[in-house]
Amino acid sequence: MYTITFRQNGSEIRTQAAGGQTILEAARAAGVDIDAPCSGNGICGKCRVKLVSGALDGGTGRQISEEERLAGIRLACESRVCGDAVIEIPETAGSFRYGIVTADLSGEKDLAVFRAAADALQEQGIARVRSGFSLIALTLDAPTLDDTVPDLDRVQLALSRETDCEAIRFSSVFVRRAAAVLRENDFRVVLPVEKKDDGSLFVYDILPPDSDMIPALAVDIGTTTVTAVLTDLLTGKILSRASAGNAQIRYGADVINRIVAASRPGGRELLEKAITEDTLRPMVEALCREAGISAGRILRVCIASNTTMNHLLTGCFADPIRMEPYIPTFFETNAFSGHDFPLGIHPDAAVLFAPNVGSYVGGDITAGTLVTRMWTKPEFSVFVDLGTNGEIVFGSEDFLMCCACSAGPAFEGGGISCGMRATRGAISELVIDPETMEPTFKTISDAAPLGLCGSGIIDTVSELFRCGIISGKGAFIREGARIRRDESSIARYVIAQGGEDQREICIDEVDIANFIRAKGAIFSAIVTMLRCVDMDMEMIDHIYIAGGIGSGLNIDNAVSVGMLPKLAKECYTYLGNTSLTGAVCMLLSSDAAEKVREIASGLTYLELSTQPGYMDEFVAACFLPHTDASLFPED
Amino acid sequence: MYTITFRQNGSEIRTQAAGGQTILEAARAAGVDIDAPCSGNGICGKCRVKLVSGALDGGTGRQISEEERLAGIRLACESRVCGDAVIEIPETAGSFRYGIVTADLSGEKDLAVFRAAADALQEQGIARVRSGFSLIALTLDAPTLDDTVPDLDRVQLALSRETDCEAIRFSSVFVRRAAAVLRENDFRVVLPVEKKDDGSLFVYDILPPDSDMIPALAVDIGTTTVTAVLTDLLTGKILSRASAGNAQIRYGADVINRIVAASRPGGRELLEKAITEDTLRPMVEALCREAGISAGRILRVCIASNTTMNHLLTGCFADPIRMEPYIPTFFETNAFSGHDFPLGIHPDAAVLFAPNVGSYVGGDITAGTLVTRMWTKPEFSVFVDLGTNGEIVFGSEDFLMCCACSAGPAFEGGGISCGMRATRGAISELVIDPETMEPTFKTISDAAPLGLCGSGIIDTVSELFRCGIISGKGAFIREGARIRRDESSIARYVIAQGGEDQREICIDEVDIANFIRAKGAIFSAIVTMLRCVDMDMEMIDHIYIAGGIGSGLNIDNAVSVGMLPKLAKECYTYLGNTSLTGAVCMLLSSDAAEKVREIASGLTYLELSTQPGYMDEFVAACFLPHTDASLFPED
């Protein structure tokens, strides 16, 4: 065994590793995060690390230049332990930030989204808040030598009188806490209860008399990004909001690589730990800190996520999802409660899942489709969810069909040198002066720029193309002060110097190629799906776009790069994170949850990969805006 | 901070302790067991340790002789850390063994007890096995590209066809395991299911096709001793059996000291951990190893225990039990499941509790009363449970009343120099030759003698008294080779040299005094209770005796020491551990569980301490056989 010392963000982690183990394996075993989008298969070249001292075997293949090699740069997945070594994990290229929790309730904007969704659904007869939960205040007689009824029976009698309900069950949390809470509060308490469908009352807990709120948690688990809000089941008020990178990313950037990693010995537990302990638990802690409650008070959870994400979260064996005939364990399940996840939430809290429709279309889409309300309209609409898996729903009140394509994490800032999630400091809007090539940009929260989020990437590529700085293939074709080239002569456009270390924020040709593949995947999926039902673009009445890409989406730019078809501007609506909004609606309203189930059961899944012509469409769409220019006529 | 090194049973544990901390506190913090029956109040003198090197402050009070002091003996509860020290924890006087698990299914004898109880109850119309559980074998079609139903729905459809039940719910354990177990077994599986009262079916798990049995766990949690069996819900077969000392003993020998310890900051968690992680978990592991199953397969648990024990187990705040007006949190609760306890059992396994009747009469007695069947008889019976708390039930088919007295752990071998639980090597029967004073004895499993269990202690005291070796006060009044005295001139009777180290197995005057107090508490409780309802001993038709005291009870000896009243020999029945037997019956049969609830609700509690004359009775009974010799006439 050798001692490997990892340095990352100024901290040092030491671990023992056997000779022959790869640095990526050693890092994973030590809980050190190295971004490995291809899951360590030596393909993506993203897992660059720097050998500071000691020796490593290999890891200097074709992706590493001679200059890099001399500077100690190695691929973590291909270099093997052969002695003690000190390894620095650079915070540069490809290191998409994850694991960082930002509990910022961005006030009006977020609230407006949820409120608008709830308002709109209410028009469809879907209650805004109707969860069966309530808080019941009780004032009890203290026991005496002549009245020695046990605490539990004392509460039960009073509660039964108060509610006219005989069938009362108590959570173990209530039983454990009752004696202390009753006596600390002179037998004046508040009980959070749920009226169950069978008419019985379930008592979750016992709280001091001044307690209000019944906190509940909605989570959107994306392959790359996880977003969550804490809400109050009684009022629907949003209490706090957080987002984080999905820590599973260290096991691969896409769902297939994740499933492969989970299928290795011990892999299932590692993937489960990455999403629960390393991602959700710190998020829940941050959300609760922000809201001033303890996690144990959370009495209900709703999770919207793709099929792979919800299978890996629940510890299901996910291999059958990726192997013919592609069978998930569940589409829908009500088997899980708080005690199944190490998140500190109430053990009896029901954990709902937005239902899956297929192995590659999951609860994020069914919850999102609820929010679009396309199922209420006679016209044809398209709903595009820009995630690592891009999912498309097409239909009307009469039918709904869907498909999925692998877009990669570019829309979430992943796989892009200076990409980041849509949080404080992310460049979310950008314009380039065609003459000077100087950029003007806006960042989220108007903070100093740190990187590019999805909407910023779309704007940048669109502006570079509009100004003739890059070609339709994404190659740089103008020169200037902001265009620089590295030693491999890969060109980049420098937007700013940012961050504490004033490092360069730029976009390079590799990033642009990644983005073009992502937008091509989306566009070709839409086209193929429509062709499948003999429809034309012109027959589409509306396009809803979702995704946590930034504070908004510049539709003109999205069209000009050929990501979305060219329709009249009023046909587009950007809905933000519909998966999260849908999860909030399901959490608060059982009507909404029921409607999502209905949507899921009526959603027909179309497997793109078996559609003739799909690959040709994809290749044709990997161009700015498209190889078939007639699809994007000049105005 | 200083380094304290504890040596116990040949192993060493090192810990850091602050100056001024007592050695008992430091040991507890380090998880080192020191027997402290008085919970560290400097009263019992049992927590003797040996200072091997280094220094300690104090701990050499009146209970430590000068010779002992020079030999390094200190009281752990009174000696304080003042530097590094090495402490040996002797395995001698007072160290009642606990934490040791013995998974010995002692074959016919135990089985006979459970079988006899079940047979007898069956005569009362109580089903032997009727738990609603069954194993359902399914052979499913494997999925294909044309049949892509998810695993969960596939199982649900087949199960619904098989059982004609539509309302099916799945455990999270099932969901997590389904994909792998289905594919490892070519879609031939067995499901353990429970038909719930509302007619719905709950699927706990998914198992390979050759699985039989539905393991379930019955536990008797005594203040001193914990006993458990693993049984099969389908057949009622006993799969394995284990007993252990209750590791809470390090926080006090009786329930009051335990509650006091639990009320200190962090105390509740320590007491909970002692009974779950330190006692029950190793027992469950041993039981499962013996039965060849994993703990996760245990689908139901029934616990019979006194009120304090079940409150400390469930983490309830127990202080109100010992403080006027003496209010427990619960008499009965169905709020707990496997996931509430760190035992590795199935998270959805219901954990039943035999119902409590009062703060000092618990589920051990209600479950035990079921087994006596005194509630089926027109005649008056007395039921005596010989535990650390002695509990007495008196009544007939028309009424039942009960009381409790503090007997101490002597009947379980606790508080006796060479006492031990009734396991392999315990001297369980003993006769003394009145001439030579030589003993003849039998041990459990005919093993080499290790110590004295409850029945052996009763026999020894009775024989010493019969042979005129000790007086009615318990003082030695004959001399001989087997009578020896220590430096404080406390006399002892040496029975054998035993154990690996051939140490002396003896009983001394302190032990005899402890025993006399224990038997006096029982006898005076019986007398006081009868007097309360104006009854005479002569009106008693039957006395049932229970307790894990050994492989049997020599009734003549129990009477001759004045523990039990003098009745015709056929009036006595020794029933073994009725608490455990009752728990097994409740586990297997919902009829039995219902009957125990009925017994509990009809059981009137009599508080002895408020009965005039009880203390006088107790003092009078602390003599062999009794200060009123007329109660025990010579035959």
Image (spheres, coloured by chain):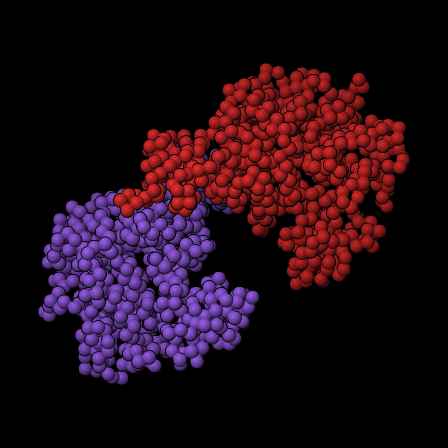
Chain colours: A red, B purple
Q: Which corner quadrant of the image does residue B495 belong to?
A: bottom left
Name the side, left or right, on which A497 lies relative to A188: right
The reply to whether residue A4 is visible in this rendering is yes
- Residue B102 position within the rendered picture, expressed as x and y whole percent measured from the top left: 37, 63
- Residue B585 position within the rendered picture, expressed as x and y whole percent measured from the top left: 28, 49
Which residue does the image show at 53% across and 19% down from the upper left?
A124
- Residue A374 position within the rendered picture, expressed as x and y whole percent measured from the top left: 60, 21
Name the side, left or right, on which B578 lies relative to A247: left
Which residue does the image show at 26% across and 74% down from the upper left?
B441
The number of callouts visible is 0
On-image quarter of the C terminus of chain B? bottom left
Q: Which corner quadrant of the image does residue B189 belong to?
A: top left
On-image quarter of the N terminus of chain B? bottom right
- The foreground one among B265 and A144 is A144
The reply to whether residue A390 is visible in this rendering is no
Question: On screen, B394 above or below B132?
Answer: below
Name the side, left or right, on which A60 lies relative to A551: right
Which residue does the image show at 23% across and 62% down from the upper left?
B521
Which residue does the image show at 50% across and 66% down from the upper left?
B20
- The foreground one among B161 and A215 is A215
Question: On screen, A573 above or below B332?
Answer: above
- Residue A537 position within the rendered picture, expressed as x and y whole percent measured from the top left: 69, 19
